[in-house]
Image (spheres, grey):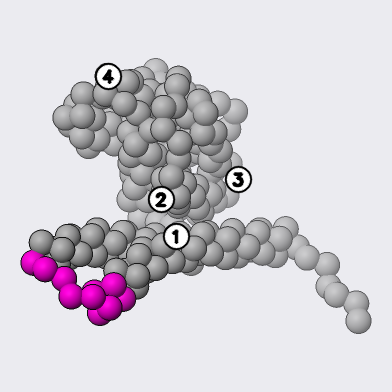
């Protein structure tokens, strides 16, 4: 039997499907831990009588595990949207976009005595993105940077022109905390959303650095990419 040659579109779709399966498997693996904890704790409750204090502890522990399960289920929903729902692309000003995201996260950083430094590119640089998804992706990345930082640490969010578009970098010079499973899932979900919009995302854990490349509006128009909205 001779198989038909795969087109670039077929290869791209297969790669996307494989990434989706890997990410879903990672989420399901993470879900197993709180489910196991809940099962053990509930088995202990049945096996032995508990006084009021022990019961309160059990309820508090169980509530934490249920919250984790809800968060992990949200990851599953997020990956499903990222891989199956077409992005609503439009032209967005990079500087305004970064300022909006930084403003939304700055109070969160300030309350923890951490600093978020913003540097936007000079001039007006338009990129083609899904506005809602790009904000979500950048916010998740800044949240991960927050999680690996300590009090008095600084995280940088910068934008600069590059090749056919704009490069956005989130970085911290030193990492004091290793990335947990859920932090890695946040980055994977951000990556899925960025790639669905035609961009690229790469990251390293130590030192913590995330680099995003987005297509410029001029490049998209030249290549004939369609926009919505």
In the picture, measured across the screen, residue 126 lies left or right of residue 14, that is left
User: Gap between marks 1 and 3, in whole Å?
Assistant: 40 Å
Which of the image's four quarters has the C terminus? bottom left
Q: Earlier in the sequence, mark 1 or mark 4?
A: 1
User: Gap between marks 1 and 4, in whole Å?
Assistant: 31 Å
Residue 72 vs residue 226, the one in the foreground: 72
Residue carrying label 1: 30
Per the rendered image, the range of residues in magenta is: 43-52
Residue carrying label 2: 182
Which of the image's four quarters has the N terminus? bottom right
| Residue 25 picture location, percent across and down | 53, 64
Mark 4 secondary-structure assignment: loop
Residue at 45% x, 21% y: name it: 174
Is residue 65 within the magenta segment? no
Tell me if label 1 and label 2 are in contact, CB under 8 Å: yes
Give the crowd class for mark 3: few <14, some 14-19, many >=20 residues within 10 Å: few
How many numbered marks does the figure carry? 4
- Which label belongs to residue 152? 4
């Amino acid at each position: 039997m001779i198989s038909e040659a795969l087109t670039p579109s077929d290869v791209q779709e297969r790669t996307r499907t494989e990434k989706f399966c890997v990410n879903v498997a990672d989420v399901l693996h993470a879900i197993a831990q709180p489910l196991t904890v809940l099962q053990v704790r509930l088995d202990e409750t049945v096996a032995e009588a508990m006084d009021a204090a022990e019961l309160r502890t059990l309820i508090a522990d169980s509530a934490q595990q249920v919250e984790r399960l809800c968060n992990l289920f949200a990851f599953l929903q997020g990956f499903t949207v990222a891989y199956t729902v077409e992005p609503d692309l439009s032209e967005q000003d990079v500087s305004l976009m970064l300022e909006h995201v930084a403003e939304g996260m700055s109070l969160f950083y300030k309350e923890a005595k951490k600093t978020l430094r913003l540097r936007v590119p000079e001039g007006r640089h338009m990129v083609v993105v899904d506005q809602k998804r790009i904000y979500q992706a950048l916010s998740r990345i800044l949240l991960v940077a927050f999680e690996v930082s300590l009090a008095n640490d600084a995280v940088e969010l910068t934008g600069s022109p590059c090749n056919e578009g704009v490069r956005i970098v989130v970085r911290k010079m030193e990492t004091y905390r290793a990335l947990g499973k859920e932090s890695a899932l946040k980055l994977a979900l951000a990556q899925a959303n960025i790639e669905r919009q035609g961009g690229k995302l790469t990251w390293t854990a130590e030192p913590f650095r995330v680099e995003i490349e987005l297509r410029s509006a001029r490049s998209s128009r030249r290549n004939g990419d369609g926009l919505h909205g």
